[in-house]
Amino acid sequence: MAELLNVLVKLDKLLDKHRIEYIVISSLADYLLGISAIKPNDINILVSKGNVEKLNTRIQQEQGIDMLEQVRWREESAIRGFYGRVLLDMVLVDIMADVQLKYLDKWMLFTYEKLLPCTHAQRFRLWLIRR
C-alpha cells in the first residue's frame, strides 16, 4: 500500500505543477476514507472535462510516465465518458472526466464539478499524505 500512496503523492505533485485539479475516486478513495478494508492496486482520478487536452499534452511531455491510452471519449453499453490510462512507477492510473453510468435505463453523470463539494474529507487526507 505504501508504494501506491507514494505514486499518488508523485501524481499529486505532477498535476499540481500543471494546475490540474483532480479527485481520487473508486477503491482508493474508499480505502483512504476508511470505508473499505480492501486494498486497491491502482489509482482512479476524475478531472474536469476542460483539463482533458491539457492533461494529455502535459503527461506526454513528462519523463517517467507512460501514456497507455490518451484521455478521450469512449462509449460502452453501461458507461461512457472521457477515459485514459497512464503507468507511473509501475502503478496503473485511470483518468476520467464526465463519466456517465447507466442505471435502470437512465444515465447518471459524474463530473469533477459535481463531486468536488463532497470531497472535503478526502482532500484533507490527501493533504496529510502529501505532507
Image (cartoon, rainbow, N blue to C red):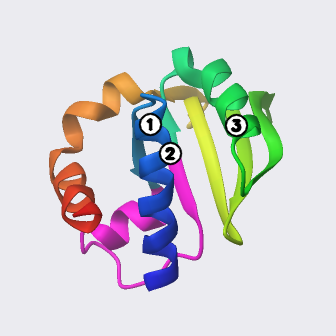
The residue that label 3 is drawn on is: 83
Q: CA distance from mark 2 to mark 1?
A: 5 Å
Please determine whether, in this image, residue 106 is positioned above or below residue 121: above
Q: Earlier in the sequence, mark 3 or mark 1?
A: 1
Residue 60 magenta-drawn? no
Could you classify mark 3 by the number of other residues whose Cα lies within 10 Å: few (under 14), some (14-19), or many (20 or more)? many
- Where residue 129 appears, x then y in whole percent? 27, 67
Report the amino acid beneath label 3. Answer: Tyr
Closest to the camera, between mark 3 and mark 1, is 1
Report the amino acid beneath label 2. Answer: Leu
For the residue pair 10 and 112, the one nearer the viewer reads as: 10
Q: On the rendered image, what quadrant is the C terminus found in?
A: bottom left
- Left or right, 31 with respect to 6, comes to left
**Extreme residue toward the top, this view:** 50
The residue that label 2 is drawn on is: 14
Q: Secondary structure at mark 3?
A: strand
- Where residue 92 appears, x then y in whole percent? 68, 63
Report the amino acid beneath label 1. Answer: Lys
Q: Which disc number belongs to residue 17?
A: 1
**Extreme residue toward the right, this view:** 68
Please determine whether, in this image, residue 62 is positioned above or below residue 110: below
Q: CA distance from mark 3 to mark 1?
A: 22 Å
Circle 2/circle 1 CB separation < 8 Å: yes
Q: Residue at x 73, y 36 (%)?
A: 61
Q: Earlier in the sequence, mark 3 or mark 2?
A: 2
